Image: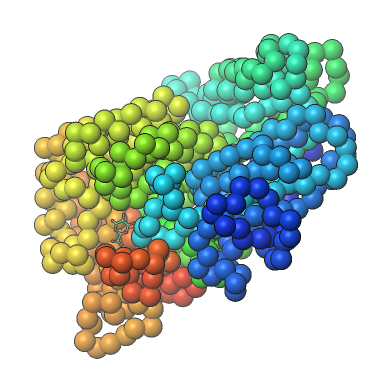
Amino acid sequence: MLRLFQTNEIRDVQELQGDWDFQPINEADEGLPSDYRYRMPVPGCWEMHPQFTTYQGKGVYRRTVEISRKGAIRLVFKGVSHTADVFFDGKPVGHHYNAYTPFAVVIPDVEPGTHEVAVVADNSFGEMSALHVPNDYYTYGGLIRPVAIELLHELFIERIAFTPIRSSEGWQGTIRLFVRNIGNRERRARLQFSLGGQEIAAGTVDAMPGEIVEFSITKPFPGVIPWSANDPKLYLLKAQLYVEGQEVPVDDLIERVGFRTVTTENGRIQVNGEDVVLKGFNRHEDHALAGAAIPYPLMVHDIELMLDMGANTVRTSHYPNDERFLDLCDERGLFVWEENHARGLSLEQMKHPLFAKQCEDCNREMVENHFNHPSIIIWAILNECASDTPEGREMYRTQLEQIRTMDSSRTLSFASHHRDRELCFDLADIVSFNLYPLWYEDEDPLELIKQARLWADQAGGLGKPMIISEFGADGYYGYRDPSRVKGTEERHAEIIERNLAAYVSVPFLSGMLIWQFCDCRVTEGTGWLLTRAGTQNSKGIVDRYRRPKLAYSVVQRYFKM
Ligand code: ADA
C-alpha cells in the first residue's frame, strides 16, 4: 500500500511489493551479481533477515516486471536506505542518496514484455555520506518503503501543491499543478479539477519537450469544513489531464487536502486562528520486528498509543517520514512537526563537501512530496547541529530560506541544545529547546524552562512561541527496583512527571515533546555511543515492541489534563 487513498484512477500504477531476489555484494563491486541466493520482502529492512542482522554494506534487490504496452514508465521509490543505484534491464538509470525521501526514475520508450528492475542499496557510512553517519538511531539497509511502477503518457502530472487560504470572505485555496512533457514535441494539456466530488476549475498549459510547466489557480471554496485536530476533515483533490483534441483523459493525479492555516502571533501558535499547545512525542521509525520498515498495522498501533496517552503532536525526529504515517496523522488529527534529516552534526561535519547538496535535496524532496498534508504544521531542519557558530548560522539561514521559498504557509523551527549560545533563533518562527533536566544535568525543570525563555528572548526569539522539543530520561523496560536509580522504570516515570508538571504550569510554552515515543536501535560504536546500553536509546515511553513502561500512565495523566 503506497498511500491510504487511491492516487490514480487513470494512470496505470502497480505496486512492486512482495519478495524480491537479494544478494549482498562487496563495496568495490560495480555491476550486478549473476546469482541471487536470498529473497527479501519489499518494503523491508535486511536486518530482519537472520543472515543480515548487522550487515552494513551493499545489497542488490532484483525482480521482473511485466509491461503491457510500449511507452514511458516511471519507477517510484518511497525510500531506499540509504543510497540507491537503480538498474533497468541491467543498465543504470538512476541514483539517489538519503533513506528517508522519495524519488522517481523515468524511463522512456520501454517495449512491452518482461523487464528486470534491480536496486543496489548501500547503508554503509562512506565518505559520500554527510547525513547518514554513526548516530543515536540506526541506519537500516534496504528498500524500506514502498516501490511502484507507473505507465506514463508522454504528458503527465508530476505533482500538485495545494495551499489553503483563510480570508474574511471564507476559505480559498491555491492549486498549483506541474505538467511534465517527456515526449519530443510541444504539447498542449487541458486540465480539469474537482474537489470533494465537485468540478472546480479547468485550464490549459503548453509544455515544450523536456519541460515541467506550472499551472496555478486560486479559487474560493465556500462551505468547506476546515481540518482540525478534533475534526480532521479531508477532501480528495482530483486533477485530470487531456491532450488537446482528445475526449478521454490520458493522465490523472489525486491528492488529499485539508483547509487549515498555521500562524504565530502573540508568542503563541495558532491553527485556524486558535491557540494550540503541542503535546506529544518524538518518534523514530523503528520497531523491534520491522526496523525502519514499519508495516501499516503497526503504524496505526503507534498512532493509537499516542492518542491513548492524550498526545496531539508527533515530531518526525530526525527525518521525513513514511507517507502512510503522515496520511494517518491527517486522518486522526495529529499535528506533525516534520524535519529534514540531520542529527547532532558538528561544524566540521557540516563542512563536508556534500552536506549542503544532500540537505538541499532532502529539503526539496520533503517539502514537494509532503506539501499537501494538513497535519504538518511545522517544517524543521538540522536537529542539534552547529547553530551556535557564525558559519553554522549561514547554513541554517540558507536552508530555512530554501524551505520558506517553497512553502510560506507553514511555520519553521529547529531544535537547539545550545542554551545561551544559540545564534539562530531570529531565523525561525518558533524557538525550540532540547533540554534534559534531571537526566544529563541535575537541574530543576521549572527553573530551567524560565531560564530558557530568557535565553530565547535575548537571542532573537523575543515574542516567538517556544517549544520544549525534547526532554526525557532512560528507562529500561522491565528494570524495576525500589532504589529508583537512574535507568529504572520508576525513575524514568518520575523524571517525566517532574518535567511535565513544570511545563504545564507555565503560560509561555506552546509545546512539549517527550524524547521519545519508543526505544530505538542505535549505531554500535565506541565513545559516547557506549552510553547506549544494549545498543539502543532507551528513553521511550514504550519499548521497541511497544510495551508500555511505568511512565505511560504518567504521560496520560498530564496530556489528558
Ligand atoms: C538529543 C537528540 C536525540 C537523542 C537525545 C538523547 O537531544 O536530539 O536524537 O540523542 O538527545 O537521548 O540524548
User: Residue 7, percent across and down?
Assistant: 69, 39
- Left or right relative to 330: residue 424: left
Q: How is the image coloured?
A: rainbow
Q: Identify the image quadrant of residue 34.
A: bottom right
- Left or right relative to 48: residue 540: left
Residue at 24 percent across and 88 percent down: it is: 482
User: Residue 365, percent across and down?
Assistant: 51, 36
Q: Identify the image quadrant of residue 388.
A: top left
| 229, 75: nearer the viewer | 75
Residue at 77 percent across and 47 percent down: it is: 116
Q: Quadrant of the C terminus?
A: bottom left
User: Residue 468, percent across and down?
Assistant: 26, 52
Residue at 69 percent across and 32 percent down: it is: 106
Q: Residue furthest bottom?
A: 482
| 175, 178: nearer the viewer | 178
Question: In the image, is residue 531 above or below residue 26?
Answer: below
Q: Quadrant of ligand 1?
A: bottom left
Residue at 64 percent across and 28 percent down: it is: 158
Image label count:
0
User: Residue 404, percent across and down?
Assistant: 39, 28
- Left or right relative to 476: residue 416: left
Q: Is residue 190 visible?
A: no
Question: In the image, is residue 353 above or below residue 198?
Answer: below
| 469, 93: nearer the viewer | 93
Q: Is residue 47 visible?
A: yes
